[in-house]
Amino acid sequence: MNALIPLYVVIPLASAFIMAILGRLIKNIGKVVVVVELLFLTCLTLFFMLKSQGTLVYRVGGFPDVGDIPIAIYMVMDGLSKLLLLIISAVGFLTALYSVSYTREYTAERKFYILFSLMIAGMNGIVISGDIFNIYVFLEIAAISSYILVAFGVEKHQLEASFKYQVLGCLASLLILLAIGFIYWGTGTLNIADISRQLPYSAPFVKFVSLLFLVGFGLKAAIFPFHAWLPDAHSSAPSPISAMLSGVLIKAIGLYVIFRLFFSMFALNADIAMTIIVLGTLSMIIGGLMAIGQWDMKRLLAYSSISQMGYVVMGVGIGMLILVRNGSQTIAAFAIFGALLHLLNHSVFKSLLFLNAGAVEYRTGIRDMRKLGGLSEKMPITSKTSLIASMSISGIPPFNGFFSKLIIILAAVQAQFYWLAFIAVAVSIITISYFLKFQKYIFYNKPGEYDHQIKEAPLPMSIAMMILALLCIMLSLMVIPSLRDQFIFPAVNVLIKNLQYSAAVLG
């Protein structure tokens, strides 16, 4: 079973190669290859989740350790990796299905799917990498692909957004590479499990490197105050790419690595935990307030992503701080469970919202909500699925977002962080307000400035939206103990039992 782990990188890379070679000869091969590739990876991930337990390790090349130093490239799959791989593969599959119709307006469809597959390979590689340098390598593969995809329409605003994204992305990569250099200089190894054995628990060196990583990956995750690139990039990109950036990319190349490094590589630290809580709280507030004033529907969704990721960061920060203070592991696990459940939920409802916005723009050519309206009857599938996603992200029961937000709020109360619980509730009310605006002006207002003969989005786009809407309802079942223990709690245990990572990987 361990030998299947490299497939998460090999299959997308091989698919990109096949599309590059055969795409000139066989029309539309990219559409078929990417959809099949991601469906297979989704099924493979579900197989791992249901059939394997504990931590699986695959050493590329099979090189034995030299003394106590692991020199092989380690690919590691544990509960946290599986959760992220499921998000990447499932959302990627539905986004690729949606793109089958959406990309007809582009003259370079073949290149779109090649870059899409490379981005998937990069994100998968980050999630299964057991050493920090290969995380950096795969991060660059995913990031460079996303830079190009943001500018894929080659319009002025897309090129400008991509340039801003590249500048800040390159700054983040520089900080990350600098931190990796310091780690290697201080420990002589790049393996995460080995580094965790050698780093001193408390030293100025460790705090400095921690800060470099937090800023670098904070930029990749677009948490406040490192979020400047996100509103332009997410709103300017083609809508399937907006869905991937917001629903998947900022989690895989940003939040996942922060959680992995600060739980599995560094010793838990109260200062870092407080910093993470503060950043998460500020992201919730600032992102929500900025979203209220937006009239471009995709910019509203982009700022909303900053706010919703704040819930995830705050929840994990609360769990980390409880563990540092030797508090109740049950409450810490509860907070982290809520955060990871919201991570999963957000990938579904935010991807759906960007696909809804893309369907509206695809038919009307308009993104300004003031020029839209009356689309509920003309685009019923888009309207109804958008309403489900809006209720989910606003935390309305019985949709999935309600349960993850409620768990985070209850965990904050149990941990006696009453102000954090109050802020989380207040931000949820703010979220309701701007999604009421989103629904009213796009779907239920008077008909706007567009061709009134428009019709529903094409079938592949509609199917993808309906499946995501169904998931917004079904993921509420993740609070059921049997499903929770099968899909989410293995990831929670990886973070709670952080001291066991090194032993699980190196023995």
Image (spheres, rainbow, N blue to C red):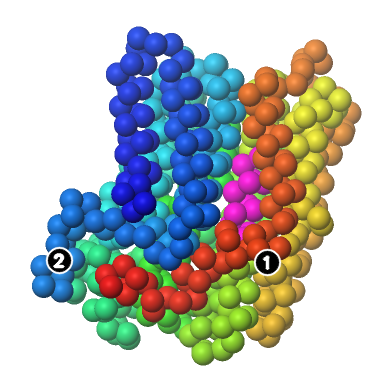
Write down the residue under mark 2: 65
Which label sits on residue 199?
none
Q: Is residue 344 rendered magenta in the image?
A: yes
For mark 1, does the 10 Å Cα neighbourhood hold few (<14), some (14 to 19), or many (20 or more) residues?
few
Determine the image quadrant of residue 67: bottom left
Q: Earlier in the sequence, mark 1 or mark 2?
A: 2
| Residue positioned most to the bottom | 326
Residue 309 lies, in percent from the top left, at 58, 58
Give me the residue at 75% from left, 59% from top.
402
Q: Is residue 9 visible?
A: yes
Q: Main secondary structure of the magenta part?
A: helix
Question: Where does the magenta region start and end?
Answer: 339-353
Picture quarter with the C terminus: bottom left
In the image, what residue type sits under mark 1? Pro
In the image, what residue type sits under mark 2? Asp
Give whichever of 203, 21 is nearer the camera. 21
Residue 272 lies, in percent from the top left, at 45, 77
Write down the residue under mark 1: 481
Please tell me whether residue 273 is drawn above or below residue 490 in the rendered image. Answer: below
Q: Using residue 367 as the reference point, say whether residue 188 is left or right of it.
A: left
